[in-house]
């Protein structure tokens, strides 16, 4: 087998890993967005822009000791239509572990 064969196989493996990471990242963002929307509905505030933004990405160990991606997302909401307030959603792997709304006016 020639060197070009190994190069092609390595290239395909890297592309597959990148595609897998991208799909996992999009799934995590969608779970974070759904958690933020649910938290806003629960507290009867308006979820703004219907989006979340990734602000932290780390490797951490979960409760089973496995290394997973730790992702922290930020979003904004309003309670009165005049001010924007921050909220956060934290994921460990595919699981939402925290969703909180910052302090806001009623």
Image (tube, grey):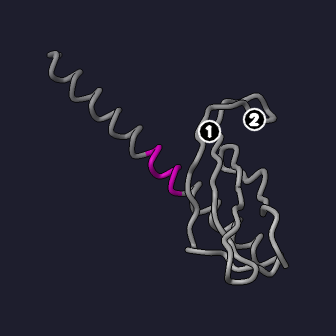
**Side of 93 relative to 6 (left or right):** right
Which residue is labeled 1 in the image?
69
**Disc 1 on helix, strand or loop?**
strand
Instruction: Report the Cα–Cα distance between label 2 and label 1.
Output: 9 Å
The numbered mark at residue 49 is none
Look at 62% across and 65% down and name the residue there: 33
Which residue is labeled 2 in the image?
62
**Side of 84 relative to 104 (left or right):** left
Please tell me which of labels 2 and 1 falls first in the chain: 2
Marks 2 & 1, CB-CB < 8 Å contact:
no
**Disc 2 on helix, strand or loop?**
loop
| Up-down relation of residue 103 to residue 98 (above or below) | below
| Up-down relation of residue 37 to residue 97 (above or below) | below
Quadrant where the C terminus lies?
Answer: bottom right
Let me know if residue 71 is in the magenta part.
no
Q: Which residues are magenta?
A: 20-26
Look at 79% across and 33% down and name the residue there: 64
């Amino acid at each position: 087998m020639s060197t070009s064969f190994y190069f092609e196989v390595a290239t395909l493996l890297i592309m597959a890993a990148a595609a897998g990471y991208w799909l996992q990242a999009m799934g995590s963002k969608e779970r974070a967005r759904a958690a933020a929307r649910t938290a806003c509905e629960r507290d009867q505030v308006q979820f703004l822009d219907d989006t979340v933004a990734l602000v932290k990405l780390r490797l951490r160990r979960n409760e089973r000791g496995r290394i997973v991606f730790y992702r922290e997302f930020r979003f904004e909401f309003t309670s009165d239509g005049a001010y924007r307030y921050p909220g956060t959603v934290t994921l460990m792997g595919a699981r939402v572990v925290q969703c909180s709304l910052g302090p806001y006016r009623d």
